[in-house]
Image (spheres, rainbow, N blue to C red):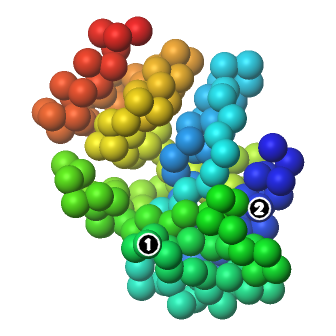
Amino acid sequence: MEQLFDVLHRVSAALREAGIEYRVIGGIAVYLHVAERDELAARMTRDIDLAVNCLDLNRIADAVRPYGFALRHVADIDMLVDAAKPSARSAVLMVMVGERVRPTDIAPIPELSAPVETSEGILIVPVADLLRMKLTSFRLKDKVHIQDLDGVGLITPEVEASLPGELLGRSAEVRETR
């Protein structure tokens, strides 16, 4: 866990220092949101996912280099790896805003809206955008993440009301399986 947060802080510091917009997404964003409400309800994840603008990739590569990372493109995935001992297993995965992660996804990654900033200066995606992403992916782990967000009251009626029809149906499906 310490290693994961060390990587998160180093990457965040590099991007912040370079003035590059990003948002932490995925399981680590769920963890950070849930832990803010109820630390005991937060489940740890094993990876870090970032939403970034594809036009910033070269700037990202330059910004993270002094922090010990290298940008790699492997199997159609952009990732930041430890430059000294590159490993996809410990990489920071990047998804591009405005693009679909998988061609079958019903919606693209939302544009970068105003972030939620943690007490340590990490920029995470707001719950409404995170919920959209989780409902779009809709894998088992995404459904569990949605339940975690809902379990601590982060999925408010206002957040749900902002969902488009198909995603609203998926949200109701997750609630029915609780």
Amino acid type, label 2: Val
* Residue that badge 2 annotates: 7
What type is the residue that disc 1 sits on? Ala
Identify which residue is drawn at 68% across, 55% down.
122
> Would residue 10 be found to the left or right of residue 157 on screen?
right
Q: Nearer the viewer, residue 94 or 164?
A: 94
**From what the image shows, is residue 8 above or below residue 165?**
below
Q: How far apart are the alpha carbons under marks 2 and 1?
A: 22 Å
Residue 87 in the image: above or below residue 155: below
Q: What quarter of the picture does the C terminus occupy?
A: top left
Residue furthest to the right: 2
Q: Which residue is mark 1?
A: 75
Residue 37 shows in the view: yes
Q: Farthest residue toward the left?
A: 165
Seen at 66% across and 19% down, the residue is: 41
Residue drawn where x is 41% and y is 30% of the image = 140
